Image (spheres, grey):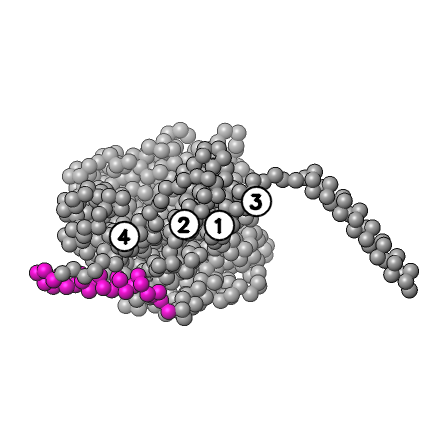
Amino acid sequence: MNKLRTFTIGGVHPKENKLSEQSSITVLPLPKQLVIPLGQNLGAPPKPVVKKGDEVKTGQLLARAEAFISANIHSPASGKIAKIDEAMDASGYKRQAIIIDVTGDEWVEGIETSTSLNKEISLSKQEIISRIKECGLVGLGGATFPTHVKMMIPEGKIAEYLIINGVECEPYLTSDHRLMLEKGDEMLVGIQIMMKALGTEKAIIGIENNKPDAIAHLKKLAVNYNGISIQPLKVKYPQGGEKQLIKAVVNREVPSGKLPIEVGCVVSNVGTAFAVYEAVQKNKPLIERVVTVTGTSLSKPSNFLVRVGTPVSDLIAAAGGLPEDTGKLINGGPMMGKAVSSPDIPIVKGSSGILLIKKVESKRSTPQSCIRCSKCTVVCPMGLEPYLLAKLSKLSVYDKAEKERIMDCIECGSCQFTCPSSLPLLDFLRLGKQRVGHLIRTRK
Amino acid sequence: MNDILLFTVLTLGLLGTVLAVILYFVAQKFKVIEDPKIDLVEDVLPKANCGGCGFPGCRSFAEVSVKSADEKRNLEGLNCPVGGNDVMKQVADILGLEVEEQEPLIAVIRCNGSHANAPSKVLYDGPASCSFAHNLFAGEGGCQFGCLGLGDCVVSCDFDAIHMNPETGLPEVNDKCIACGACVKACPRAIIELRHKGKKDRRIFVSCVNKEKGGPAKKNCSVACIGCSKCQQVCPFDAIIMANNLAYIDFEKCKLCRKCVEVCPTDAIHEINFPLRKAKAETDQTAEKKERAVKEVAATVSDAISPSVNESDTENKA
C-alpha cells in the first residue's frame, strides 16, 4: 500500500476524541431572540441597512458590505429589529450587533427552501461571484475570509487546483465530517460551481484517514462529477492549515508572506462548498451553519444546524445541558479555540464548534523554565523557532521577532501543546504577532 | 644583566613614545568637538535613564537641552520629571536661561474595580501580561475598560513606585512616583494618568474610565461612573468634562473643593490625602465615605505590599 500523503515539517498528534462522529446533523429550533454581531468576517464590518422597529423576513439583507474585504449579513429568521446596540462577543468585549425578536420563519421571496438536488449550473462565472458576494459567504473553516474575494483571481495568476479542506484536524470537532456524509452531493455541486468561477479543471478534496466513511462515500459520489478527486491524508495536526494542506495534497510550498494563489492553488472548506451550492443554486444567503457541541462530560455530544445569532447556551441545552463540572467553555476546537467568558454569546458565521472542558482538565500547568529541548522547533509546521519568538515577544523586541518571521506563525498551538515545561508559547506568539502586525501597518 | 634591563627599558620607552605621538595625532585628527555644557548639564541630571523626559537617557536630554538653548534661547517642552524643578533650575543656570516652574505630577490609577467592587465572573489563568489579556478578553470582572490586574505597570516602573495590592487586585502608586510616564505607556487600557500632585499631595479624580452607559457599567462594577453629570452640575469651576458617559476632572481647573465627591451616587470620584470632613448630618453614606478616605490615606502612605508577595509575583512572570 502506498504511504499516505501529509505535510513534511513538524506537526503533532493530539488525541482525536471525535465524540460526536456518529450523531447526524439535527436542526435546532429558532430561539426567541437572535443577536447578530456586525463584525463576523475578516476585514471591515458591514453597515446596517435596517433600523430599530423594522420587520424583517428570513434571508433579508441586514447589513451591506461597503469595503472590498467585507461580507453582507442577512436575517436568520423573520421578526422585528429590537435594537441595534452593543452586545457581548466571544471575548467579552461589547461590539455593535443587530438584535432581532423572532416571530417566525417566513422567507423572503426568491429563495428556494426545498432540499431537492439541483445539479445544473446555469449561471456564468461573473454571476456566480456576484451571487456569492450578495449572499454574504465567508470561509467557514474559521478564518471567515469573504469567499467572493477569494474567487477573484488576481491578473496574471492561474488557479490550477481547487483544494477542498475536508481534513478537520482539530480534535473533537465533527461538523465538516457530518456535512461530507450527509450533504455529499450538494457539496460536490458546490465544488463544481467554484471550479467554474475560478476556471479550474481540477479539484482535490483532502480528507484525513480517520474518516474512512467520508472518504468512501465521496469517492463513490465523485465518479459522477468531472475533475473532482479525493485524496486521503495521514492524520496529523495542523493539516487543515491552508499552507500545510497544499503541501500535503499537491506537494507545493507557499512562499513566506504570500497567498496560495502564488503556487496556483485556491483552498476552501467543505462547509463553504456547501454554502456556495446553497447560495448559487437556491439563492440562499449564509444564515445557518453546522456547529459541533461536544465535551467528555456532555451527555449528548451532537452536530446542529443552527441559525447565526443563536445563543451558545441554547446549543448546550439541546446537547444535554451544561454539566456541573464544566471548567472551560471553548469557542472552536481545543487547539486553536479561545475560552469564552459567558455562554450567552451568539453563534457567528465562523463558529465551528463549542467545546466543554471539565474543571480538572481545564487547569493550566504551572510554567517551568525552558529546558532548551527544542521540541517546539521540531513540531512547528511553519519551521519557526517558537521558544525564541515567544521570548522576543515577551521582551518586546519586535524588530528582531519580525526578522525571525513571526508573521508566518499560523497560531496552530503545536508548540504549546508539545512543550514539556508548559510554557505559554502560543500566547506570547499571538501577542507578538499582533504587535508586529501593528508596527508593519504603521510603517506603511 | 644590566644590558638586558637597559635594552628592555629603552625599547619599551621608545615604543611607548612613538605610539603616544601617533595616538596624539590620531586624536587630533578625529576629534569630536562637543559643547562642554553637555557634560555639565548631564552631571546635574539624576542619571536614572528612565526616558520620562521623552528622550532615550539623560545624555540625550542634556544634548537636546543644550541644542535648544543655543538655537531657540529657551527650554520649552523640556522637563526632567525625576529631578523636578530643582534640577531644571540648575540646568537653566548652566545654560544661562530662566525656566518656568512646573507643577509636579504623579501617576493616578483611574479604576476602582477591586475584587469587592467588581467581582470576578470568570477566571483567567493565562500568562501574567495585561497586554496579552487585553487582546484576549474583557477582564475577569467583565468590564472591558477596567484594570486587568496583571501588573504590566508594576513591571514597567523603574522607581519601585507602583505595586499590586493583593487584596483589591489593583495597582497602587506610592510616594516614590516621579511621573516618568512608563506605566501610562505600559497600560493597554489607558487607565493610568499623570495628574498634578496637588497642594499637600491632595487630589481629586474620577476613578473610572468606563465609557458604557450607566446600566451596563453598573452591572459589572458597583463603583463605575454612570455618566449622570451630577458632578458637572455642582462644580463651580467648570472643571468637569462629560464625554462618552464618563466624567473627567480637568486638574488644571480643579480647585479641590470636594463638592463633586459628595454628589457622586456611585462613589466614583476619589479624594486623596484630605482630612476627614466635619461631622455634618452623619448618615450611613457619609460614614462609609469617611472610612474609605481613611483607608486611602493609609494606602498611599504605606508601601501597601509585603516584599515576599512581590518576589513571588516576579517569579511567576519570569
> Alpha carbon of mark 1 to alpha carbon of mark 3: how far?
60 Å
- Label 3 amino acid? Glu
The residues bearing labels 4 and 1 have C-alpha atoms spaced at a distance of: 27 Å
Q: Nearer the viewer, mark 4 or mark 3?
A: 4
The Cα–Cα distance between marks 4 and 3, rounded to whole angstroms, is: 67 Å
Residue B314 place in picture, x, y as percent: 44, 64
Mark positioned earlier in the residue sequence (4 or 1): 1
Amino acid at circle 4: Lys
Of all chains, the one bearing label 1 is: B
Q: CA distance from mark 2 to mark 3?
A: 64 Å
4 vs 2, front mark: 2
For mark 3, what is the residue? A253
Q: Amino acid at mark 2?
A: Asp
The mark found on residue B44 in the picture is 1
Query: Looking at the image, which is closer to me, B123 or A97?
Result: B123
Of residues A344 and B255, which is closer to you in this image?
B255
Secondary structure type for disc 2: helix
Q: Distance of mark 4 from mark 2, alpha carbons?
A: 18 Å
**Rendered location of residue A180, percent (x, y):** 40, 50
| Callout 1 and callout 3 share a chain | no
Confirm whether residue B20 shows in the render: yes
Residue under numbered circle 4? B199
Q: Are marks 4 and 2 in contact (CB under 8 Å)?
A: no
Of residues B104 and B137, which is closer to you in this image? Answer: B104
Measured in 3D between alpha carbons, the distance from the residue under mark 2 to the one under mark 1, in whole angstroms, is 10 Å
Please report, as a chain letter, where disc 3 is located: A
- Please tell me how crowded label 4 is: few (under 14), some (14-19), or many (20+) other residues with Cα within 10 Å: few
Query: Which of the two discs, 2 and 1, labels the residue nearer the N terminus?
Result: 1
